[in-house]
Image (cartoon, rainbow, N blue to C red):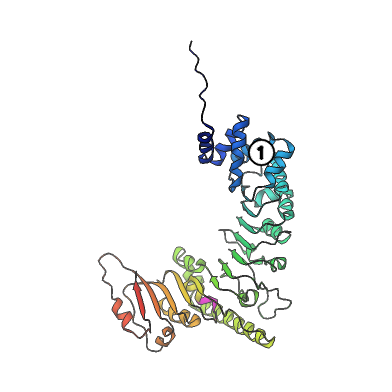
């Protein structure tokens, strides 16, 4: 029987093979020999992604093979970590190891947590470990509900970027308020649900977030009086109000009965009243104004309509097709007085009425996308002929 000598691979080639391998493969290679373990350390110069129990288990096995000093050095130098806790509820040993890992990642700057709500019910110590982290600049939490909201409220880190999302719609989310402790450093906020005020008629001790420039608040249409946004975030340059209402109208026909035009108008008028009151209060305090530097406002047509904004912006982007609501487009444009308008309209286009044309006079650049059915001919000329005032028109 012939035995083959082990093949000797050039160290540089071996290094390149390890670098190109997926992170879970690198962790498996690291458990085979000392040389591969050394090479696999380089994996942690990149974001560490532990997206399931298998990846987490390989990572734990890898770190257990290190000396104590080496393990602490490696964990302490991880700067970006993604962990999925979806499958941890039935694995307390992995949950405990996850807690230990978080306690040791003292150099972490970016943290993403996925589906941690259920495991926090049975193992709240994980949430405590997250809350104790310091110096995290970017925090993203997917699948956030009550338990994760509590973790955010108790964090010692003061992130510059906070992303909190949940695709589900439940009244529970509407009771969550942004923790005042984040006001000192927060610059970018993206949330799927947030309650800006339980009582829109009387705001006291309002915490402002003056450094926030980018704000995305979605799925908040059912939260009456939510638009104290102007006072909460007075210095925005980008605002995204999402497409929750528009999608509900399209995907759920019964929404036409629940969210008929009168309730939309009521929501709009309520928010306009709140916005005017906010502007008045700032003026009484000697402030210079709210949302004076807005460069971009985007959202679905009904979401923008209900928002009732009173502000100017350089660019207004209406997301999705304006199908059931062409009549409120002129009011949305009038709210924002944009220099540039981006919108998708269904054909055939309706000519603007004389009493609404003035709302479009601020528009200098128009990006128009048409929804045409098979064999349908565009009548874009009828729309453009009206005195929009646009100097540059792009038909996409």
Label 1, secondary structure: give it.
Answer: helix
Q: Position of residue 42 (x, y in %)?
A: 59, 42
Q: Residues within 10 Å of mark 1 (few under 14, many from 20)?
A: some
Q: Which of the 4 image quadrants contains residue 218?
A: bottom right
Q: Which of the 4 image quadrants contains residue 150?
A: bottom right
Q: Is residue 149 above or below residue 280?
A: above
The secondary structure making up most of the magenta span is helix
Q: Position of residue 244 (x, y in %)?
A: 51, 66
For the residue pair 108 and 251, the one nearer the viewer reads as 108
Quadrant assignment for the C terminus: bottom left
For the residue pair 324 and 228, the one nearer the viewer reads as 228
Q: Is residue 357 above or below residue 374?
A: below
As for residue 307 lying within the magenta part, the answer is yes
> Number of labelled discs?
1
Q: In this view, does 251 lie above or below 327?
A: above
Residue indicated by mark 1: 60
Q: Position of residue 375 (x, y in %)?
A: 25, 66
Q: Which residue is found at the position 53% from the left and 40% from the top? A: 19
Q: Where is residue 242 in the image (x, y as percent from the top left)?
A: 52, 67
Magenta residues (range): 305-309
Q: Can residue 368 be seen by looking at this rendering?
A: yes
| 127 lies left or right of 216 | right
Q: Is residue 275 above or below residue 110?
A: below
């Amino acid at each position: 029987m012939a035995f083959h000598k082990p093949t000797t691979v050039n160290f540089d080639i071996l290094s390149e093979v390890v670098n190109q391998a997926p992170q879970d493969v690198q962790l498996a290679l690291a458990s085979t020999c000392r040389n591969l373990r050394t090479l696999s350390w380089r994996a942690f110069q990149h974001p560490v992604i532990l997206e399931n129990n298998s990846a987490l288990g390989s990572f734990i096995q890898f770190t257990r093979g290190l000396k104590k000093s080496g393990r602490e050095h490696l964990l302490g130098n991880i700067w970006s970590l993604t962990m999925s806790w979806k499958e941890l509820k039935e694995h307390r040993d992995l949950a405990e190891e996850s807690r230990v890992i978080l306690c040791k990642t003292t150099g972490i700057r970016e943290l993403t947590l996925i589906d941690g709500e259920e495991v926090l019910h049975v193992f709240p110590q994980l949430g405590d470990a997250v809350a104790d982290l310091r110096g995290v600049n970017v925090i993203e939490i997917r699948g956030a509900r009550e338990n994760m909201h509590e973790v955010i409220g108790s964090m010692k880190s003061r992130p510059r970027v906070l992303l909190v999302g949940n695709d589900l719609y439940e009244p529970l989310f509407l009771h969550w308020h942004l923790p005042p402790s984040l006001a000192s450093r927060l610059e970018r906020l993206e949330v799927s649900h947030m309650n800006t005020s339980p009582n829109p008629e009387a705001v006291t001790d309002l915490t402002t977030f003056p450094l926030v420039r980018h704000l995305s608040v979605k799925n908040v249409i059912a939260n009456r009086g939510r638009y104290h946004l102007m006072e909460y975030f007075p210095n925005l340059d980008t605002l995204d109000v999402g497409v929750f209402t528009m999608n509900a109208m399209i995907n759920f026909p019964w929404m036409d009965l629940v969210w008929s035009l009168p309730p939309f108008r009521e929501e709009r008028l309520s928010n306009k009243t709140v916005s005017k009151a906010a502007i008045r209060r700032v003026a009484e305090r000697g402030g210079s104004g709210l949302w004076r530097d807005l460069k971009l406002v985007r959202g679905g047509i009904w979401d923008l309509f209900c928002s009732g904004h009173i502000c100017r912006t350089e660019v207004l982007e209406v997301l999705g097709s304006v199908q059931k609501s062409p009549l409120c487009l002129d009011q949305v444009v009038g709210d924002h007085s944009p220099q540039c308008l981006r919108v998708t309209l269904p054909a055939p286009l309706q000519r603007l009425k004389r009493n609404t044309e003035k709302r479009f006079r601020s528009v200098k650049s128009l990006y128009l996308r048409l929804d045409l059915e098979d064999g349908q001919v565009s009548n874009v000329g009828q729309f453009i002929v009206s005195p929009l005032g646009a100097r540059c028109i792009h038909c996409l």
